[in-house]
Amino acid sequence: MPDSVDADISTDLQRTRRFCGGLRRDIRRRLIPHYKSDWTDAFTDGNLQKTTACIAFLFFACLSPAITFGAMYENDTNFNMGVSETLLASSIAGITYSLLCGQPLCILGGTGPNLAYTVGFYKLCNVLDVDFLPARVWQGLWCSLFTVILALTDASSLMQYCTRFTEDIFSALISVIFIVGALEQIFDAFRTKDTAGALLTACLAFGTYLLAVTLRDLKKTKWLTSGLRYTISNFAVSLSIVAMSGIAQAFPKNVDIDWLAAPDRLQPSFQVGSNPRPWIIDPLGGQGLNPERKIRALPTWAIFAAIFPGIGMALLNYLDQNLTALLINRPSSARKKPAGYHLDLFVLGAVIYPIVSILGLPFPCAATVRSVAHQNALTTFDDKRIPGGGTQRVATKVIETRWTHFAIHALMAFSTLFGPLLRNIPKAVLFGVFLYMGISSMPGNQFFERIFLWGIWNTRDYPKYDYIIHLPIKRVHLFTAIQTGCFIILYLLKDNKDTSVGFPFFIAGLIVLRRFFGRIFTQNELEDLDGNELMPKSSTAGADPEKVEESKTTESCVQQSEENAKAAIVLEATQSSECDESIIAPESPTTPSAAFGPSHKSEL
């Protein structure tokens, strides 16, 4: 296994040009050698507290979207799918995925494009007078087949053409969607509720966010003991949910706020007469799964016509899954284990999609914000000082484990047992959690860093990022302006229900657009603006000044010796002379390894 993460990623996405080559490589390099440590890492090296806190946080972060998407499915498919189906789909997919996948940091769940595509297929079935659920079984089976084909033919290797330009836009878009979505829900309370209910909603939401941030940053203070600070910081979000829910209970019951609508039991949403439909759907029909409850068979032509919607769903989930996995596996994540793009896709197509198709459940795939939140909850970050002002968050360690993924979705499977307890949580508190997830995912995104530069009018005050040192400021702003334009267009497409189904395809279009940047920017400019460096090459933050100066001097000596290539005695004299001159010469940018010491290079 390669020592550096960059080598891992380049190898994982390299096309093998052999049938099942990428899948076999993922099994050989990721699944087999690391399977045991994927479980034990959660309980060793002092990781138990952090993984337990992650499970508590992500349980709420995954449960609430599942209930929300379930309510939307009920409204848009006339109860052919609902809350029970989304909860069961998340539970089955999450548990199965945690046992077999290649990258357990990715969290499976419902997504907006998937919802829009399913609703579109439901409307098509109504127009064609075909039972939706039996037809969807065939759509799902065709989707499974084409997903397996994509996995066996190394289709995920195409993601190697996705650069930081696209990754940062995608990551920023998801962060903003969560932030704007939470704020919309908060402000909507002032339109739909009385003054008391609206104010309490806003106070609970913003209070949850502020309390979570305060408790998270407690470890940076001198309060209490170091052990208590660390514990409280790890459970910051969970403690905030409990505290703000308790405060909400202190208010009179007649104050109009919304509470989490957790179900009491799992049963199919669609009713046939006075009973719920069977969990197992007959792919040939005959179960009365239509608005009139007529017992009729599924036409033969519909079985083969479902190929085309199946291909579309496979491509949609392929892009959703791989784009999210790309963000999780990016070099700045500090991961040590290889990725498993092809294995992840194979598990979805060969195991998960056939199961959810037969049960009439939504198709899950990697959900970006929940996956990033899961990874961040298991990551240890350091704040590195940047010359010129400010700090940059750098990941130093991430717990790569299957246990948290498994436990989160196992709890979701038994969430109906906690129904009476969960219904005491105000929705406003979860709005605050979403706000926290969106804002906390912004640091480390180079796109946001360059956007914030627009607010600094004196260029001398710019932080000394690598691209600020090496490139003209106008070229940096031009790259940011193009990125901002793409971001705005994608946000408008995502925000529109009629176009949201094509959102992943527009993301793929950015990968194609980036291929033409060589006509606008030079190769050196693209390396600085679209590279994977964590910190500016010239940064000496956190390093010993004497060692940094010594490193500069030594590097200058070596370069000079290579250029001259003289005899040993003459070379030694030349090195000494050049070393003396380098001490008073203007400083040249140092490499990340010089700034952070030899150990940091291996993390990059």
Image: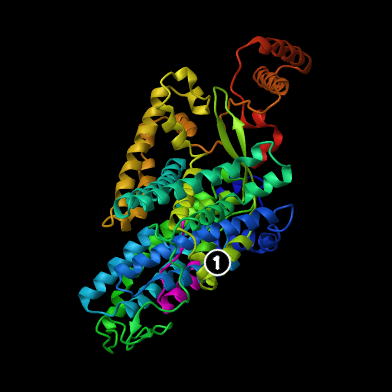
Q: Is residue 95 above or below residue 496?
A: below
Residue extending furthest toward the right: 569
What is the count of numbered marks? 1
Residue 411's x, y, as percent?
Answer: 57, 68
Q: What residue range appears in magenta?
A: 348-368
Q: Quadrant of the C terminus?
A: top right
Q: Secondary structure at mark 1?
A: helix
Residue extending furthest toward the left: 127
Seen from the viewer's position, the closer of residues 227 and 342 is 227
The answer to whether 489 appears left or right of 436 in the picture is left
Seen from the viewer's position, the closer of residues 349 and 221 is 221
Hey, what amino acid is under mark 1?
Answer: His
Seen from the viewer's position, the closer of residues 27 and 246 is 246
Is 352 magenta? The answer is yes
The image's colour scheme reads rainbow
Q: Residue at x 63, y 46 (%)?
A: 233
Would residue 145 be visible to someone looking at this image? no
Seen from the viewer's position, the closer of residues 504 and 307 is 504
Residue under circle 1? Answer: 409
Is 553 magenta? The answer is no
Prevailing SS of the magenta stretch: helix
Q: Residue at x 47, y 29 (%)?
A: 524
**Residue 97 figure quarter:** bottom right
